[in-house]
């Protein structure tokens, strides 16, 4: 059997292996994924952490670099709350300005009446009083803009292991023509 380097493997197949569940039969890319945010974020970012989303922050300590500034390829870790009892993880696809970024994630908005679908390059904005990315709002399809809920976050897990080894994000992490202007309008409206 021929082995391919990680950056050449089929993302949908990687998702199935990492998630421990079958990928949809029609899945050909990462964006065809339907399921939970954790296996999606793991496949999209290359960061190998398992368990509920809110546990990623502590699990990353000593394994991956962490911080409070968004960077492309980093995983933003949402704290668990009443609305997010397992937390949430999303992958930064683009940084727009000091308070606006875009994420690619799964299981947030409803699409075709169901949750679990992947969304690419949606707006994430820092609404923390100290501009430290400790509280965010996320674009929500049903609202056609930023949702009204503020979510607390731990911070960002960077795609670099503490030993300096870089991990590779999936090529579909960001689109060719993300709507930068729309993201800024969402954030500053």
Image: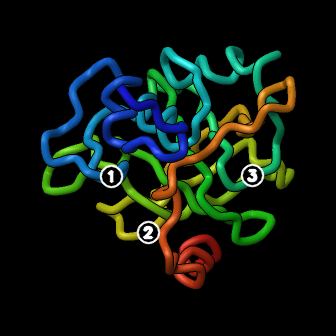
Q: At 57% from the left edge and 23% from the top edge, which residue is drawn?
A: 54
- In space, the residues marked 3 and 2 are separated at their CA atoms by 20 Å
In the rendered image, which residue does mark 3 sit on? 70
Q: At 40% from the left edge and 31% from the top edge, which residue is drawn?
A: 2
Q: Are marks 1 and 2 in contact (CB under 8 Å)?
A: no
Looking at the picture, tell me which residue is in the foreground, 35 or 112: 35
In the rendered image, which residue does mark 2 sit on? 145
In the rendered image, which residue does mark 1 sit on? 29
| Lower sequence index among marks 3 and 1 | 1
Secondary structure beneath dot 3 equals loop
| Lower sequence index among marks 1 and 2 | 1
Q: What x and y, as percent, mark residue 122? A: 49, 63
Q: At 59% from the left edge and 79% from the top edge, which residue is drawn?
A: 180
The answer to which image quadrant residue 10 occupies is top left
| Lower sequence index among marks 3 and 2 | 3
Q: Residues within 10 Å of mark 1 (few under 14, many from 20)?
A: some
Q: At 14% from the left edge and 56% from the top edge, which residue is drawn?
A: 112
Q: As displayed, is residue 23 above or below residue 80? A: below
Mark 3 or 2: the one toward you: 3
Looking at the picture, tell me which residue is in the foreground, 129 or 182: 182
């Amino acid at each position: 059997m021929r082995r391919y380097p990680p950056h050449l493997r089929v993302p949908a197949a990687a998702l199935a292996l990492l998630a421990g569940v079958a990928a949809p039969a029609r899945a050909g890319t990462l964006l065809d994924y339907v399921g939970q945010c954790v296996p999606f974020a793991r496949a999209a970012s290359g960061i190998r952490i398992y368990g509920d989303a809110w546990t990623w922050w502590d699990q990353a300590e000593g394994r991956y670099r962490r911080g409070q500034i968004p960077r492309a390829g980093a995983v933003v870790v949402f704290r668990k709350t009443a609305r997010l009892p397992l937390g949430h993880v999303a992958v930064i696809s683009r940084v727009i300005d000091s308070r606006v970024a875009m994420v690619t994630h799964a299981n947030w908005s409803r699409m075709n009446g169901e949750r679990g679908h992947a969304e690419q390059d949606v707006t994430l904005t820092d609404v923390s009083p100290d501009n430290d990315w400790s509280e965010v709002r996320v674009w929500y399809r049903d609202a056609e803009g930023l949702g009204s809920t503020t979510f607390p976050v731990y911070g960002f897990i960077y795609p670099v292991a503490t030993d300096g080894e870089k991990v590779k994000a999936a090529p579909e992490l960001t689109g060719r023509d993300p709507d930068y202007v729309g993201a800024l309008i969402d954030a500053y409206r």
